[in-house]
Amino acid sequence: MRKVLIDCDPGHDDAVAILYAARHLDLVGVTTIFGNQTTALTTQNALKVLTLARLDVPVAQGCARPLLGEAPLAPDTHGPSGLDGVELPEPNRPAIDMHAIDFIIEAARRWQDELVLAITGAHTNVAMALRLEPRLKSWLAEITIMGGTAGVGNLRAQACVNILSDPEAAHIVFTSGVPIRWIGYETTRDVLMGEGDIARLDAGGKVARAVGDIARYYRARQRTVYGIDGAPMHDACAIVPFARPGLIGYAPVPIEVVLGANLARGMTLVDRRPIQPGVALSSVQAKKSANALMAVQVDVRGVIDALVDTMLSYE
Amino acid sequence: MASRPKILIDCDPGHDDAVAILFAHRHLDLVGVTTVHGNNTLANTTLNALRVLALGAIAVPVAAGAAVPLVQDANPPAALHGSSGLDGASLPAPVAAPLALHGAEFIIEMASKHRGALVLAVLGPQTNVALALRREPRLKDWLAEITIMGGSTALGNITPVAEFNIHCDPEAAAIVFESGVPIRMVGYNVTRTTGFDGHDIARLRASGRGVARTMADLLDFYLHKQRQAFALELAPMHDVCAIVPYVAPQLIDYAHTSVSVELAGTHTRGQTVCDLRNVQAAAALHLRGLAPANARVALAARARPLIDLVIDTLLTYP
């Protein structure tokens, strides 16, 4: 089983990703970051979800703010708690007495070449870990990212919350040299749990019913804010391929994060021109070599069914 | 009399860093040295720091920090210090190895150990300090003051408006200036006026003392480079100006104002934008770019007494 560590900001779709990973992979830990709410709140949410599912996975709290500036929050779709709309038990233990940055470094050191690091929130913890431990980039097997977009955005016209929350940190991750698997919002916004999926969850055990509530609340917010009719399972898309490789197809692309102080700040710039990398013509800028595998097609029904089946497999 | 202030020096030796280390150890309680990329590679700045400490028989721990800037691509080494980063003299071999922890972690450890009492001198790119501030949110309350050699209120050196240390890692500098820690900054506008000339170097050499002679050799090299590059007859002692206020506060004048680091400008990335307008509150209605004061910024120095103090200090070494 692949070892995976999820760095996240639960968050409705983060919660589903955690529950999926715990069932099919060796989830060695969860580290938390701000984004859907403050780090303190996302940490509590992570602990509550794990407590609900009786999962003995350590949670290490991470950075409270991005590298530059203050922490921007996106509670419009997740509510004041960061995980509104579902009743979760109080955590049965606290976060461990170790910073997320150190936990990431120690896990990668312990499981060199085996550990997959999933980032489904802001990239601050991972960027700090990469800078404080230069060997980390050779220890990690892969980084799998949900964040940014190659098309329409959410918080901005063409940019998304996870990257916008800390563009400098995302730049550090995307230039790190670690093999990267990336799925953008333009794709995940169509990976929707609908009424039928929620009905199936409502008929299941307590974990499935909680996920049904999560999907119901999230779907309602998506309708109000974006006119999307369904609960998008963004973050699970970064995890599912490690258990079900056939469900998502990838193509290698060069991708970089736009920094600076302009309208494009926080954009993930993907070069999808069908030209050879490295070849420059007089006015056609050379395409850089690929630094990530970009998700280009998703078996949406396959992914959603896999998620629902997984939630139903919990007691 | 109060005991000497405790100081930790984060630096990239560097000729002027070397002078600052020897000066600090003689007058203050130097508790450690951390090294960073900048004047040369981290490997070389670390080796140079160890060799300077060996030269001065200074037994303090050294921790190597960041090899690359926080966000931007790595910079080429500065030519002014030679290929080793400290060319011009044969320095003794190190007498100790660096600690096993990252310089940023060591800064956190020492600040925690000496809460409210530690001055952190930042004499190179600010990468380590930025990492430490983001790794440990309480650090900003533990440090007594950060004293910076970097930036400028006016012209730059590496670019028309940016000074080398800030330009090497502008994002790190932005983090430091926004941190809320009391800051003292001496920029290139002042340090370019405070330098050794040929007579100062001759005074060192004439003493017959070993450390002074080695420093004279180093400074001869540095002066030669300054002549070549800028037609200067002065070897600017940038870094020691960040230490002097804790020894002879009357030698440098400061203004308390706001400093912001420009990150996005095509022509101005790495500039320290210092508000010296002396804006009166009531008249501020239509002015822009106002920000809370976050630093004491050096405006002028009494160069000759400052340099004499530094030479006298170097002459106290055997």
Image (tube, rainbow, N blue to C red):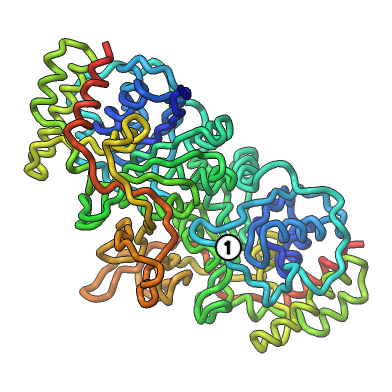
Please say if A159 is above or below B194. below
Residue identifier under label 1:
A71
Q: Farthest residue to the front: give it.
A: B282
Residue sitting nearer the eye, A175 or A271:
A175
Q: Chain of mark 1?
A: A
Please say if A136 is above or below B271. above
Residue B135 visible, this angle: yes
Amino acid under disc 1: Ala
Q: Residue at x 75, y 81 (%)?
A: A219
Left/right placement of residue A144 relative to residue B24 reads: right
Q: Position of residue A255 (x, y in %)?
A: 45, 66
Q: Position of residue A159 (x, y in %)?
A: 51, 75
Q: Quadrant of the C terminus of chain B?
A: top left
Q: Position of residue A156 (x, y in %)?
A: 53, 78
Left/right placement of residue B146 relative to residue A113 reads: left
Please say if A202 is above or below A57. below
Q: Residue at x 27, y 62 (%)?
A: B268
Q: Position of residue B316 (x, y in %)?
A: 27, 15
Q: On the image, which quarter does residue A279 sit in?
A: bottom left
Residue A300 visible, this angle: no
Q: Quadrant of the N terminus of chain B?
A: top left
Residue sitting nearer the eye, A225 or A307:
A225
Determine the secondary structure under disc 1: loop
